[in-house]
Each structure stands twice: as structure tokens, then as C-alpha cells.
Image (spheres, rainbow, N blue to C red):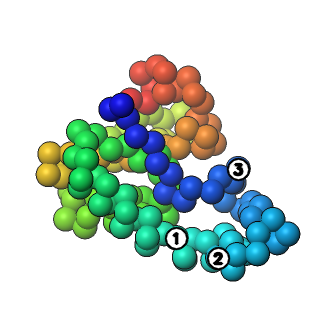
Amino acid sequence: SKTCILELLPLPSPRADNWFYKKPLSDLPELQSREKYKSEMLQFRIKEIKKLIGVCKPRRVLFYGGSSEYRDYWKKIVGCSANWKNELLYKDKKQTVYREMTLVSGIEYEILPHPTSYYIKNSDYETDRIR
């Protein structure tokens, strides 16, 4: 396949403030809070995703999630030397949505709004609204 989908933090959660993996579901200390999970997993996952991109050399990498927290993680994966540019995707009464893009070592990187974020619908990705 020419497509690979990875999660930065692989345990699913419907919202950042929901955490289902503590006791009684798990006795693992790193799963007792979302904060502990992130502190235990983020650096490892960032390093491994960066390594995987280096080995596979994809043409394009899409990062979903445009919050400032997640943009910082994406930029760590790409590297601090990247020169990012913003492009307005759309603006309406509820929000203004941008995409950030850069080209590093022949790989195009884009940061896009997460498909499940507020005001974003799947149809936005199926039309010209977000591309």
C-alpha cells in the first residue's frame, strides 16, 4: 500500500479531557492519567515516527490536528529548520481555518484541522473546502 495512517498517541479517546484507561481497566502506572501517558509516550512516538518517515521517504505527510499543542509536536517530527507557510482554507462566522505547509528534503508536510474538530465535517474533506 502507498498509504500509512499513524496516531501520535495511539490509545483512542473521544476528547482530550476523557481518559478511560486508569484503574480498574489498567494497573499500568503510565495509564493512570492522560498527562502521565503523554509524558511517557510522546518523545518515544515522535522519535519513532520521525525515523519511519526517514526510512520510507513518503512524498507527503499529513498531520491532523491544528491546536498549538499538536502543531508543536508535528514540528518536532519535521525538524526545527523547516520554513512553514500558512494558507487560508476558509473563513466563516464560526472560525477561520488555516493549513500550514513546508517542504523538507523533498517531503511535503501539511498540518490540517482534525476531521473530528468542531465545525469540521467529513464533507469538508470530500469537497474543495479542505484540500
Q: CA distance from mark 1 to mark 2?
A: 9 Å
Q: Please tell me whether mark 2 sits on a helix, a strand or a loop.
A: helix
Q: Residue at x 37, y 63 (%)?
A: 48
Circle count:
3
- Outermost residue on the bottom side: it is 29
Quadrant housing residue 89:
top left
User: Where residue 74 sits: x, y (%)?
Assistant: 38, 58
Residue at the disc numbered 1: 41
* Amino acid type, label 1: Met
- Are the residues at dot 1 and dot 2 in contact (C-beta closer than 8 Å)? yes
The residue furthest left is 105
Residue 46 or residue 120, whichever sits in front: 46
**Mark in the foreground, 3 or 2:** 2
Q: Which residue is mark 3?
A: 14
First reached walking from the N terminus: tag 1 or tag 2: 2
Q: Is residue 106 depicted above or below 51 in this figure? A: above
Give the CA distance from mark 3 to mark 2: 19 Å
Q: Earlier in the sequence, mark 1 or mark 3?
A: 3
Residue 92 image offset from top left, x and y in percent? 53, 33
Q: Which mark is residue 30?
A: 2
Secondary structure beneath disc 3?
loop
